[in-house]
Amino acid sequence: MKVIIAGFLLPLGLLIATQALAQDIGNVTQAIPVRDADHVVIGLGAIYSSGSEGGDIYRFLPVPVVDIKKGRFFANLRDGIGVDVVDTDFVTVGASITTTQGRRASDVPPGIGSVSFGAGAHGFIRFHDHGFFLTFGGTQGFAGGTQGFVADANLSYPVSVSKRLTISPAISTT
């Protein structure tokens, strides 16, 4: 198992992860990202984003970095807390409970109003080959202000620049 304290910055779809402290447990010596190894990544980062889809007000917000994997169980900000039902060298299929994004009234035009953050049931299928990750997912909200269905797709290619730096260029749509 690898324990890492990390931080990241997400400007316009480019994820930069830096490893601040690493402790190898057992004989895992590969650099993160490691798709199938048990690991714990904890840290603090920031995201630069608009407050709502199509919004023109951008701001930096602090974001916790959490990525925990133990066997088929996982907890991370991308997929929530759940289990990989299928996990092979080429495909991972998972189900989880995850957060659903809300919005502040100050981030949208007058009269639209705020939407509280909530929770949703999330399912995904992720293909991984030659270093590329292609993910299709869907979340059905069941608590909070966002109780609709959201589908997403993401293509990324993490590049380990060094043992302490991984850059993950990605393109995604929701």
Image (cartoon, rainbow, N blue to C red):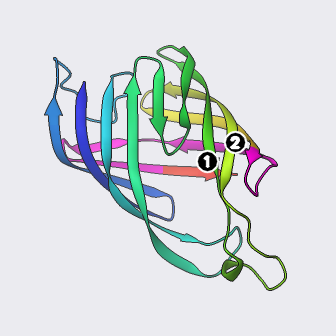
Query: Which residue has dot 1 on it?
Result: 99
Q: Is 153 positioned to the left or the right of 75 in the image?
A: right
Residue 67: horizontal and vertical position, in percent?
39, 39
Query: Which residues, given as a range, are shown in magenta?
Result: 142-169
Q: Do the residues labelled 1 and 2 touch (CB within 8 Å)?
A: yes
Q: Is 164 inside the magenta-drawn segment?
A: yes
SS category of the residue bearing label 2? strand
Residue 131: horizontal and vertical position, in percent?
42, 32
- Quadrant containing the N terminus is top left
Q: Could you say which disc has been placed on residue 7 in the image? A: none
Query: In the rendered structure, which amino acid carries the disc numbered 2?
Result: Gly
Is most of the magenta stretch helix, strand or loop? Answer: strand
The correct choice, above or below, for 137 with respect to 9 in the image is: above
Along the line of sight, the residue nearer the viewer: 36 or 105: 105
Query: Which residue has dot 2 on it?
Result: 120
Q: Is 86 positioned to the left or the right of 32 in the image?
A: right
